[in-house]
Amino acid sequence: MHHSLAWSLYIDSSANIEVTDSSFVMAKAIGVNLHSITNVHLDGVFVGDVTERVITALDDFLDKRACFAFCSYFGGECDGSITNSIAAGCSYAGFVAPGHNCD
């Protein structure tokens, strides 16, 4: 997928999905966004050249940006993985994911 006018891939409230050997290039704000997922796995996915959206309605508004947003854009519970994948040319971050408390 290339030249999306918004996010290239958004998986929300879904289960048992596999995305393999896919490329998402030139999206706006977020390349791949995963939210509230169960058993969703990405393998061999390339996301690149994600740019800012032009937002003129809100002065000095900073849009969230990343190649991959793994349950980090809206939060939510996530059971899944991203393996053997590449993030390149994103203006803020390649992979954004929530942290976990540890002892």
Image (cartoon, grey):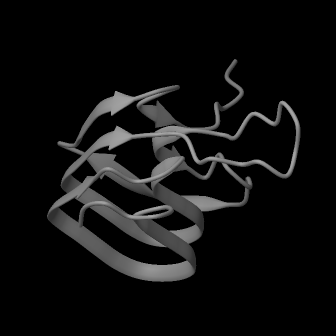
Q: Residue furthest left?
A: 21
Residue 99 location, x and y as percent? 64, 31
- Asked if residue 48 is positioned above or below residue 14 in the image, the reply reads above
Residue 34 location, x and y as percent? 52, 61
Residue 61 location, x and y as percent? 81, 36
- Asked if residue 23 is positioned above or below residue 12 in the image, the reply reads above
Left or right, 8 with respect to 12, comes to left
User: Which quadrant holds residue 103?
Assistant: top right
Q: Nearer the viewer, residue 71 or 9?
A: 9
- Asked if residue 69 is positioned above or below residue 17 in the image, the reply reads above
Q: Tell me the residue at 31%/60% (across/down).
A: 3
Q: Residue furthest front?
A: 56
Q: Tell me the residue at 16%/62% (across/down).
A: 22
Left or right, 74 with respect to 13, comes to right
How many circles with numbers are drawn on the protein?
0
Q: Nearer the viewer, residue 93 or 17?
A: 93
Q: Tell me the residue at 20%/55% (across/down).
A: 43
Left or right, 95 with respect to 101, comes to left
* Image quadrant occupied by the N terminus: bottom left
Residue 91 location, x and y as percent? 47, 27
